[in-house]
Image (spheres, rainbow, N blue to C red):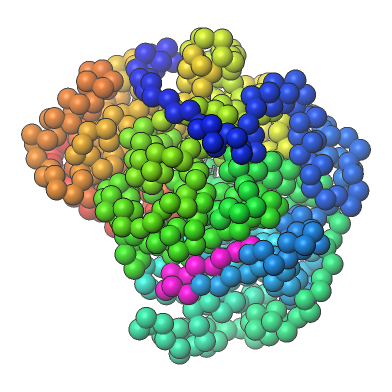
Amino acid sequence: MSETIETLLTETRQFKPSAEFTSTANASSEDIYAQAEADPEGWWASWAEKLDWYKKWDTVLEWNRPFAKWFIGGKLNACYNCVDRHVSAGMGDKIALIGDGEPGDIRNFTYSQVKDRVSQISNGLKAMGIGKGDIVCLYMPMGPELAMTMLACARIGAPHSVIFGGFTAESIADRANDCGAKAIVTSDGTWRRGKIVELKKIVDQAMELGCHTVKNVLVFERVGAPGTETNGQAAPDYNQGTWVEGRDERAADVVDTASTDCPCEEMDAEDLLFILYTSGSTGKPKGIMHTTGGYLTGVSATSKLVFDFKDTDVFWCTADCGWITGHSYVVYGPMSNCVTQVMYEGAPDTPGKDRFWKIIEQHGVSVLYTAPTAIRTFMKWGEEYPNGCDLSSLRLLGSVGEPINPEAWMWYHKVIGNEKCPIVDTWWQTETGGIMITPLPGIVSTKPGSATRPFPGVGATIYSEEGVDLGANSDGKEAGGLLVLKRPWPSMLRGIWGDEDRYRDVYWSKFDDAYFAGDGAKRDADGFFWLLGRVDDIMLVSGHNISTMEVESALVDHPAVAEAAVIGKQHEVKGQAIAAFVIVKAGYEATDELRKEIRMHVGQKIGPVARPDDLIFTADVPKTRSGKIMRRLLRDIAEGRVLGDTTTLADPNVVASLQTEHDKEGQ
Ligand code: WT7
């Protein structure tokens, strides 16, 4: 990997937390890093103690690599910790959830109201025969009911498996069959870009394909009683046609009428809290398992310190609960900290491209957590949209999902944060459950593009390809290689549902003494981590390791470039040649001259070896629904192959038009 280090980003800007921010920060002293490092188990146990337990644990950690158990013997309930204990502590009237629907309807729920509604949903599930240990799939719109249904499952000890509301009937059937789900909870529909997406219909299709263990489908009404109109669109009649008596139940019948009293199950710390499927780059989705005590401890601690939650904060994490981010930083982390949050249902450009900023203005959002892909989209749309709204309530910004290029970081800092909000760039994964590498905003000086330091207690370091530990401490030495986690952490995955061998294989076979995360990273002389993307995103060009992310970052650094996606395509001489798919900003014309200029720009930024051979101008790049560039498809296009699986694409049309543009330009 040594060539990579030579060509790494040369970002040197640093942003120190203001004295004012530090003076009130939840974490303000460098000492906590040393304390946690000296006694990681004691550190995590101190966070577990902040939760409410029916019975305290006997042992903090049992580690039989690769299997960890945390807080053994402890009994607790995740829903109790996210809801009931706040009500008991007198916080019942505090707003928990602000549901902001795409058509503009707003519904607030206080913690007391959440407790009542969650209990009703739990009782409804129980009436359908769901009990402790039964798995329930949730295929619902992003909104309060989804969060509350997750909590309702946790309340009765039924693990949930949330399926993102944009997935197909086939994905639902695959997942429901893999985990043996006993019920599916859905809704009539949801709003997306001004149109109704009929979720219940998609569940019906999944049932037709065959969900062999599913006995019941519970349906919430979201888009309105059949026949009623919103913004000129009639709500679908989900009662007709495919409704199956005895299988399908209306929430109006089994939830609204249920008692608001439902006891919380006493769960073991190691009982399954949920399964969440994550797509591997190859093969069938993996059912990632998270358990109760360790997971809740991890997400509660990271929420409190990374997002610096105060009683007065209004938090908005823009991720859907269909992803791990929504599990950890909408439901379990923030709610265990009794935070007020916004949940937004729809698209960022509906009704206008200022929707996000309007939401922040309207609800006084103080902490915003979003993704680099969204930030780059907003950059492309232009500053006038955020500039037209009052964003002065913001005090802290977060980023997650992929490396944030310095260009986007600076835009976020200036245009959204008004140069006064610290930015926390948080690295983690579905598998890690919670944030692993991140600044603590009152302590750590940030550098645009770096996720900075491991969260206290996290054993992150960099290994060479051969498994040599290149160190993680600020010993003044730079290192480049593979990111690994050397010690267990409470919110780590406990395995892949039904496939122990795959768990060992995927995460614990590359190195025998560390969890391999799949990401390449560099550590700079200050001990800061710079994530370089998945290692399968590293290109080998004429013997040089070049990260796709690094070239993308250099491309978007050019004033004409809005967004870029880079891949390595096979090349007879070089091994791999760089192909870049580039979206230009409004007001620029995609000319041959500009193409030459952008290629030169990359050469100047990184070195001639990184100059793309092919540069294809395009209107869009194919992304998964979670916003990750689908490099495999771009590679297929660049190498002229028949396209592989496109079922997880957010917008399948993008590929067809890309192919045409690629062929037209004769690259
Ligand atoms: C992969 C995990 C974590 C929740 C959302 C994604 C990439 C995530 C960052 C970041 C650089 C990042 C990594 C990681 N990633 N956050 N701040 N900087 N890369 O969860 O779908 O499980 O994906 O996302 O490549 O391995 P996921």
- Residue positioned 81% across, 74% down in the render: 261
Expressed as whole percent of the image width and height from the top left, the position of residue 400 reads 49, 42
The mark total stands at 0
Q: Is 648 or 118 nearer to us in this picture? A: 118
- From the viewer's perspective, tell me whether residue 502 is left or right of residue 50: left
Figure quadrant of the C terminus? top left
Quarter of the image where one finds residue 194: bottom left
Residue 177 in view here: no
Figure quadrant of the N terminus? top left
- Residue positioned 80% across, 29% down in the render: 42
Q: Is 119 or 655 nearer to us in this picture? A: 119
- From the viewer's perspective, tell me whether residue 444 is left or right of residue 122: left
Residue 167 position (above or below residue 509) = below
- Residue positioned 22% across, 21% down in the render: 603
Residue 357 position (above or below residue 22) = below
Q: Which residues are magenta?
A: 96-105
Expressed as whole percent of the image width and height from the top left, the position of residue 448 reads 41, 30
